[in-house]
Image: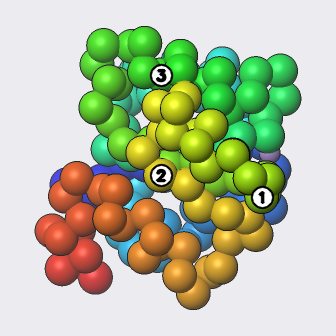
Amino acid sequence: MKNTILLIEDNEQNCYLMTFLLESHNFSVVVAMDGHSGTRLAEQIKPDLILLDIQLPATDGYAVAMALRNITSLQHTPIVAVTSYAMVGDREKCLAAGCNGYIEKPINPETFVGEILPFMPSAASSESTT
Ligand code: MN
């Protein structure tokens, strides 16, 4: 069974690129374009990992991460923040909000999947199939 990644990202080009890269590595990708629908989808599909943009409309990624962590069934789901914020303290802010890791935009297509694999609970098994 494929591992499912929920991508919460409001930029269509980023969605397209990240979905392409992840599907190329045999992941199943579900996209939400705002935090509210992302939170609802996460509760429904219980993804293996959540990729979370920080700069989102209405509700920012920090608030979304905290909302996700308040859902009992998602307390241990890995959340990796993806953000162009490069200010000192943002990494800590992501981690304080409940994220497990942090990837900076723009993403590097060569290394992107490798960067999130360490956060994937069953990384080894999914990689061996590619
Ligand atoms: Mn964004």
Number of the front mark, 2 or 3: 2
Left or right position of 124 against 68: left
Mark 2 or mark 3: whose residue is earlier in sequence: 3
Q: Secondary structure at mark 2?
A: strand
Q: Residue at x 53, y 21 (%)?
A: 66
Q: Which residue is mark 1?
A: 86
Residue closest to the eye, 118 or 126: 118
Number of the front mark, 1 or 3: 1
| 92 up-or-down from 105: above or below | above
Q: Which residue is mark 3?
A: 68
Left or right position of 80 against 32: left
Q: Which residue is mark 2?
A: 101
- Residue 114 locus on image (x, y percent): 42, 76
- Marks 1 and 3 sit apart, C-alpha to C-alpha, by 23 Å
Residue closest to the eye, 127 or 91: 91
- Residue 7 locus on image (x, y percent): 57, 46
Q: Amino acid at mark 3?
A: Leu
Residue sticking out furthest to the front: 88
- Marks 2 and 1 sit apart, C-alpha to C-alpha, by 14 Å
- Residue 17 locus on image (x, y percent): 68, 68
Q: Amino acid at mark 2?
A: Gly
